[in-house]
Amino acid sequence: MTPPPEPQPDLLALLRSVRATRWFTDDAVTEAEIAAIVEAARWTGSARNRQPWRLLIATDAAVRARLGGLGAYAGHLAAAPVVVALAVDRDLGGADASFDEGRLCQTIVLAAHALGLGSCPATIFPEDNVRAAADLLGVGPPWRVEHAIALGRPAPRPPRVTAVPTGRRAADEFAGPPRPTP
């Protein structure tokens, strides 16, 4: 029997420290950083290895501004120096496409965080906006652009009151009761 892997406290600390970043400095994200994120994303697992996605990288300010207007929660895309839009072929991905897209998004967020970058996913909706995003980024059916991720160097959050709760639930609130030890 193979022994379990050794714990990696640095990696676990990294996972616990990820936060959504919606405010960015004007500092550029380098081509090398973008390439490193793309390389990490390329290795994301997918059901039956179908990889039903393409990454569309937007650095042009006008494109980012237009993407930021394509959903009630997409405004932060306009402020980010880089937007990574996720184009997904739901026919290729089948019933697993949404799950695979979530895995891809999380890989991108974690890779950005490991590089010291901030990120925040955005949902593009309703359907007219999904089509507008695809057109803006130069893809057509079967590709759909329903999500994008803002990337950049984190800036301090502006002072304001937010209705979004902070903190995390305790593990026993969402993981169920402890299991008996065998």
Image (cartoon, rainbow, N blue to C red):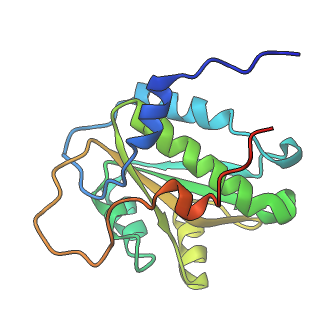
- In this rendering, the count of numbered labels is 0
Nearer to us in this view, 27 or 112: 112
Apparent side of residue 91 relative to residue 33 in the rendered image (left or right) = right
Outermost residue, left direction?
Answer: 159
Left or right: 179 with respect to 150?
A: right
Residue 125 picture quarter = bottom right
Q: Position of residue 169 (x, y in %)?
A: 45, 61
Where residue 84 sits: x, y (%)?
49, 50
Please say if 156 is above or below 166.
above
| Relative height, residue 158 to residue 56 (above, below) | below
Q: Quadrant of the N terminus?
A: top right
The residue nearer to you, when weighing 159 against 14, is: 14
**Observer able to see residue 34:** no
In the image shown, does 98 or 33 lie closer to the viewer? Answer: 98
Q: Where is residue 147 in the image (x, y as percent from the top left)?
A: 55, 63
Q: In this view, does 173 lie to the left or right of 102?
A: left
Q: Which residue is drawn at 56% across and 84% down?
A: 126
> On the image, which quarter does residue 69 sit in?
bottom left
Residue name at image x 17 percent, y 57 percent: 157
Location of residue 60 with respect to 124 vertically, above or below: above
For the question of whether residue 88 can be seen, the reply is: yes
**Residue drawn at 57 percent across, 42 percent down:** 107
Between 97 and 85, the one lying in front of the other is 97
- Measured as percent of width and height from the top left, residue 109 is found at 48, 45
Say which residue appears at 51% left-offset and 70% top-offset.
123
Dividing the image into 4 quarters, which one contains the C terminus? top right
